[in-house]
Structure formats: structure tokens, C-alpha cells
Amino acid sequence: MIIIGADYHPGFQQIAFVDTDTGEFQERQLQHREEAEKFYRELAAQGQKVRVGMEASGHARWFERLLAELNFELWIGDAAEIQTKRVRKPKTDREDARLLLRLLLEDRFPRIWVPSWENRDLRQLLWHRHRMVQARTRIMNQLPAVALNEGLRAKKKLWRECGRQQLESFPLAPWASRRRQDLLALLDRLNPTIAELNQAVDLEVERCPAARRWMTHPGVGPLTALAFVLIIGEAGRFGCGQQIASYVGLVPLEKSSGNRRRLGHITKQGNSMLRFLLVEAAQVTARSIPEWRSRYFHLRMRRGRKIAKVAMARRLAVRLYWMMRKQWDYEQLKKFGSHAGQPGTGDGVYRTPSN
């Protein structure tokens, strides 16, 4: 078997590899894509069994597809954890490749979960829709300024037919008129595109029982439910709700030393789109459930609006995780959630054995 440690870069990869049968060790630098593809195809033609280890990085889809086509094992490692295992101060591409190879040989490689190709493609749907909505929001934020300069303060009425007619009727200078015309044209192009993407999201949710189950929770819509399914993946990867909150970056950054404990802003690690959707969904949940509403206003009075939103988003993420782990819908969560694990109750996990 050939084990390869690959320090991957967009234009090339530095590899260190060893043949476990003969003990032969070699190092090479492969340029992308032709030289690298030729090297790996030659190994496949020799009938070699190959395992490749690399750090998690972007711009490597073609490389992953190539190894999957050749039936080679690809292990992707946690870059932050790999960094902690480096003992030598000099950091070069050759040293990085050797480190990856050594971790593979010593069975210390910090392998991470990798989603399937179908999962990744559906994520592109969510990201594309998310970016289109952001572009539309930027355009919609500019048009009210044009209207205000002409004395029209319509707010939401600006997006109705009568409001748009008023906006188009104002006589403007040539370049101001050109700006108004281009912004309205872009808005007319984005609206049908976003509507089509929304229909595609709804269709994917219909095919996903887990997403439909989470939509039973107040405030959780198709986008949040589908994003949680795709990004969290398997509930077994996490041991508790704290790990879920940390995974999506909704926990405070801690910098403590000695007797001093300092908590800062949230880490913002993980998927930014899922974090954004959870914050938006948590605000709807706070308006829908009286208990959440009172908790939100209590936090808002003590810590401010922004911190209250983040705290409710974290609570929602933990709730969705337990719904995923227990395979519960919202009604089951209300029935069992507050009593689970308490002995002596019908809904607890412990019962006295009967004779």
C-alpha cells in the first residue's frame, strides 16, 4: 500500500509518500492539474492501493473527484489540530507533507467527517439563493434613498405597484435616472430567480423527512431546516448541545489564564449561512412561543438586543440537535423534552425493573 501526505495548494501539491511493502520513501512536487493527474493515474494503472491524507482546504473538488474515480482513499484532516502536532519551528511545504505522512503512518491523523457529493451540491443551492437574496437586499436598500431625495418616504409601500410608479415618475438628472433604471432592472431580474430557487428548496424539503420534522418547530422554515440537515449531517458526530453551539460559532471566545477568565464575542466559526439562518429563525420563534418571548425580552433588557438574538439562536440550535438525535417532532419535544432523563416519570429513560 502507498500512503501519501499531500500539502495541497491551488497551483501545486507537495507530496511525501512511502510504500509500506518495500519501505521506499519519496518526495515530489506535482503541478496542477496535468502533472498531478498523470501521477495518480499511473499509480492506479500499477494496481496500487493508495491512501492520501491532506488538510481541509478549498478549491480541491477536482482532486477529490479524481481520487474517487481511481478508488483511492482520501482522508481529510482538521487543519487546526494538525497545526498543534507540528514540533519543528521551520514551516515549509516539504515539512508539512512529511508531517501529514507521519501522522498517517502513526495512526494519529485527525480525520474529519466529509459530506457526500449530493450534500455538497445541495449546499450550493442554498448558498446561491443566499447570495442572490443578499444582492437583492443591497439593491433594495439603495432605491429608498433615491425616493427620499425626491421627497417620497414610502417605506414598504415603495415595493408595491403604486410606489414603484411614483418612483419611476420622478424627473431626475441623466446619471441619477440611469442609476434608478439599472437598479430597477436588476431587481426585476433577481425576483424571478429567487422565486425559482425558493421552489427548488421547497422541493428538496419535501424529499427530506428530517427537514419536514424540524419545520414543525415554530419559527423554523424550509431554508433553516434544510441547511441544518445538510451542514450538521449526522447527530452522532456530536456528544452534546454545547458541541453543536460551538460548531456553528454561537459560543463566546474564551481567553482565560490562571485565575482570570475572560469571555469575548462569539467565535463565528463554522458555516456563516447556517448561523445567519438560526438567528433569523430564533427571532420568529421568540414571537411565536410565549416562553421564548419572555426569555428574549429578559435577555434584551440585561445584555442588549444583539446578545439576546445570539442567545436565542444558540438555544434553537441545541433544540434542533436534540430533535435530530431523538428523531422527535415539535409535539414530541414538548411532551418528552422537559422530563427526559428524570427517574420516576413515565417519560424518563430510567424505570425500575419489574419482577
Image (cartoon, helix red, strand yellow):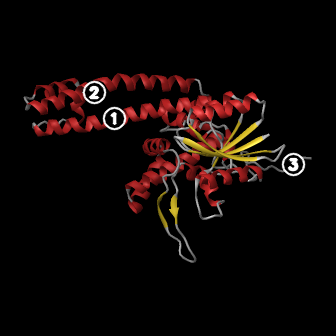
x, y (%) of residue 337? 64, 46
Mark 2 residue element: helix
Residue 19: percent from left, percent from top? 78, 43
x and y percent of residue 132 in the render? 38, 32
User: Mark 2 highlights which residue?
Assistant: 186
Specify whether 325 is left or right of 224.
right
Q: Which residue is mark 1?
A: 135
- With respect to residue 234, does 174 lie above or below? above
Task: Say whether marks 1 and 2 touch (CB < 8 Å).
Answer: yes
Identify residue type, mark 2.
Answer: Leu
Kindly identify the residue that appears in the image at 38 percent across and 59 percent down.
304
- Which of the two discs, 1 and 2, labels the residue nearer the N terminus? 1
At x 92%, y 47%, the residue is 355
Of the pair 105 and 34, the residue shown nearer to us: 34
Residue under label 3: 353
**Which quarter of the rendered picture does the N terminus lie within?**
top right
Badge 2 density bin: few <14, some 14–19, many ≥20, Cα 10 Å: few
